[in-house]
Image (spheres, rainbow, N blue to C red):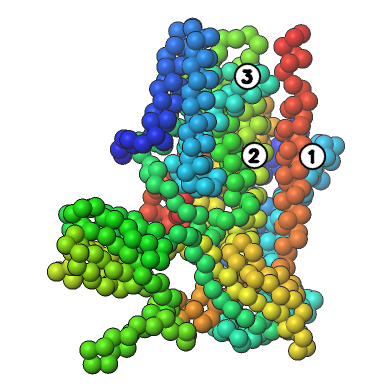
């Protein structure tokens, strides 16, 4: 853990600051100012991501620093898309999620540029990681809605927006195809690079577990609908917990050494 | 939902939960033991039950037939399970027994430069089998990112990362002088005859990358030193600098030819992510001779069941996107919000 006294670091801190300011301002009701700050944070995030891309000369999704930076950037378009197209609110929470995911990029993970090892030099590298990152953001939003449902509060009092249970379902509907595509692309890539489309590596197994939790969610919800809304929410939160393990614990813990260990 | 269908759903959900638990358990085992665990006999029964359950689901729930996307998802999963079971070691044994097809499931072959080989050492078995064709290795090479770097450090903690550029003088500042890289070697050899030392880049087999550098101190005294990639960081107590030579591997390349009945029938330079496909097998760059770069080690993998798995992936993705995305976007919010 340390402060990054670099242009890259300063850009990340500025984006974190803008997201936090947006959250603080929007929470009591100054939504327009909050939104402007949110957009400002997103623009700085884009600059930070572009700067990183220029520095390392490849799509910056190689390690946890770059993945978290990417998540901190795409949170805004996802948030906008969800509100406009899917009637799912939680913009204030998204601002906070943006700051939270940028925090490890700013303070925890090393930003030392790395050249791509041979296995990562594939056309599947960018789409595989990008769809996973996108799906994780949708699932994080789903988990937030599920927590709101359990807490019996609405994330956003806007009448046009869906209630937490329905919003959780809609977020998982949006994220699950991406999660599936990420798993399939990873499998195809594994076949090309290592010869196995499934290598039983810890990261692969945790990814499978997270995918299966959402499969379980769909089946359970199909069986009972909204009758056991709290259990539906528990599935969604459980899925997010497994995703966090997949993304962080597998790469950071010595318990799970495997083919994906380079992604730290 | 009637009781029978509900029971089918419960069994399906139980199987899903079991697989979640097994995946988490497998993650703690590590890849090798997890592979054993998921290929064991009880697991085989589980996979078979899951495939049958998916088939039962399609038969019992009319919705899966009525909504094509849902049907695709479940059928895709069956194909993935079927294809992977058919391509497993057990599947290969079954094919040999029933269909008389004797393919190598997975193994490795070592090929020296200029030689051809058709023997494959089977993975997890002390057996050697032969392919019906030969693979010839014309050349194996490693490629590196440019520029390569010479690292210079002092005992006081100063450090420099110097790009390898022949005859370019690099200043270390007024207190430390300059460094000039005079020559780069792929296979450094030194002969000593009395007081005379001769260094050459030996063209014979061998691998010993090194740099010849000249260090000029602030007084103008010049010392010649050799820095070796494979013994980086070696230093004597009297040395002023700690020197190391780093190269980052960009790729491993094996130039291969496939020879059948004495004729070259295919050629490919295989790299990581770019295997050779021939005769129902994929050939992957797996390892190499790290001492002299004289041979390559290829991973040989049978393609049995692979098309089924890929077809399953395609159906699963098509079904999931169709069912969860396209239908979702169709009922877009703009219309509802304007109501």
Q: Earlier in the sequence, mark 3 or mark 2?
A: 3
Q: Which mark is residue B69?
A: 1
Q: CA distance from mark 1 to mark 3?
A: 26 Å
Q: Which chain does the numbered disc 2 sit on?
A: A
Q: CA distance from mark 3 to mark 2?
A: 19 Å
Question: As drawn, which residue projects farthest toward the left?
Answer: B238
Name the residue nearer the viewer: A199 or B185: B185
**Which image quadrant for residue B40?**
bottom right
Q: Position of residue A256 (x, y in %)?
A: 43, 54
**Which image quadrant for residue A182?**
top right
Q: Position of residue A84 (x, y in %)?
A: 66, 18
Q: Residues within 10 Å of mark 1 (few under 14, many from 20)?
A: many
B187 is higher (above) or lower (below) than A234: below
Question: Would you name the residue on which mark 2 appears?
Answer: A178
Q: Position of residue B52 (x, y in %)?
A: 73, 53
B122 is higher (above) or lower (below) than B310: below
Secondary structure at badge 3 equals helix
Q: Residues within 10 Å of mark 3 (few under 14, many from 20)?
A: some
For the N terminus of chain A, the quadrant is top left
- What residue is drawn where x is 62% and y is 28%? A171
In front: mark 1 or mark 3?
3
Is there any visible trace of residue B83 in the rendered image?
yes
Question: Would you name the residue on which mark 3 appears?
Answer: A83
A112 is higher (above) or lower (below) than A239: below
């Amino acid at each position: 853990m340390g402060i990054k006294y670099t242009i890259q670091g300063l850009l990340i801190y500025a984006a974190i600051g803008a997201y936090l300011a947006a959250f603080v301002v929007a929470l009591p009701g100054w939504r327009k100012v909050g939104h402007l700050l949110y957009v400002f944070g997103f623009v700085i995030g884009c600059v930070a991501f572009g700067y990183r891309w220029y520095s390392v000369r490849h799509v910056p999704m190689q390690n946890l620093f770059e993945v978290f930076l990417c998540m901190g950037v795409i949170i805004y378009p996802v948030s906008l898309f969800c509100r406009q197209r899917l009637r799912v609110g939680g913009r204030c929470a998204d601002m906070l999620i943006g700051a939270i995911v940028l925090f490890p990029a700013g303070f925890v993970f090393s930003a030392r540029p790395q050249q791509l090892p041979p296995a990562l030099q594939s056309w599947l590298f960018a789409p595989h990681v990008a769809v996973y990152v996108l799906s994780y953001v949708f699932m994080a939003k789903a988990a937030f809605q599920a927590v709101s449902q359990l807490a019996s509060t609405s994330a956003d009092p806007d009448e046009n927006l869906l209630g937490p249970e329905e919003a959780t379902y809609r977020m998982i509907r949006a994220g699950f195809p991406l999660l599936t595509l990420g798993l399939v692309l990873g499998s195809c890539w594994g076949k090309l690079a290592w010869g196995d489309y499934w290598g039983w590596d810890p990261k692969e197994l945790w990814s499978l577990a997270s995918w299966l939790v959402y499969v379980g969610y769909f089946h359970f919800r199909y069986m009972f609908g909204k009758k056991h809304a709290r259990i539906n929410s528990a599935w969604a939160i459980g899925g997010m917990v497994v995703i966090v393990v997949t993304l962080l614990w597998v790469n950071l813990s010595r318990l799970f050494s495997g083919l994906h260990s380079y992604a730290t | 939902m009637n009781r029978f269908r509900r029971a089918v759903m419960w069994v399906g959900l139980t199987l899903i939960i079991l697989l979640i638990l097994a995946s988490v358990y497998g993650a703690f085992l590590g890849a090798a033991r997890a592979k054993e665990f998921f290929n064991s006999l009880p697991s085989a029964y589980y996979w078979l039950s899951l495939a049958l359950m998916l088939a039962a689901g399609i038969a019992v729930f009319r919705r899966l037939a009525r909504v094509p996307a849902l049907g695709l998802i479940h059928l895709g999963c069956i194909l993935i399970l079927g294809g992977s079971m058919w391509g497993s070691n057990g599947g290969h044994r079954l094919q040999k027994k029933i269909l008389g097809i004797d393919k190598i499931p997975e193994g490795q072959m070592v090929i020296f430069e200029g030689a051809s080989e058709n023997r494959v050492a089977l993975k997890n078995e002390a057996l050697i089998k032969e392919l019906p064709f030969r693979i010839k290795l014309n050349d194996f090479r490693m490629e590196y990112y440019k520029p390569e770097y010479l690292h210079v450090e002092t005992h006081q903690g100063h450090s420099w990362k110097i790009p390898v550029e022949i005859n370019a003088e690099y200043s270390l500042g007024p207190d430390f002088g300059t460094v000039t890289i005079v020559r780069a070697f792929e296979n450094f050899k030194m002969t000593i005859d009395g007081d005379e030392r001769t260094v050459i880049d030996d063209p014979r087999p061998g691998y010993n990358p090194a740099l010849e550098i000249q260090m000029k101190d602030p007084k103008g005294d010049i010392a010649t030193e050799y820095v070796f990639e494979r013994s980086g960081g070696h230093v004597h107590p009297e040395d002023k600098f700690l020197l190391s030579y780093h190269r980052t591997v960009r790729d491993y390349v094996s130039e291969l030819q496939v020879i059948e009945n004495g004729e070259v029938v295919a050629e490919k330079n295989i790299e990581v992510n770019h295997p050779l496909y021939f005769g129902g097998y994929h050939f992957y760059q797996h390892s190499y001779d790290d001492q002299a770069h004289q041979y390559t080690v290829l991973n040989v993998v049978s393609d049995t069941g692979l098309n089924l798995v890929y077809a399953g992936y395609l159906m699963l993705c098509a079904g999931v996107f169709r069912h969860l995305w396209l239908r979702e976007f169709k009922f877009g919010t703009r219309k509802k919000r304007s109501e």
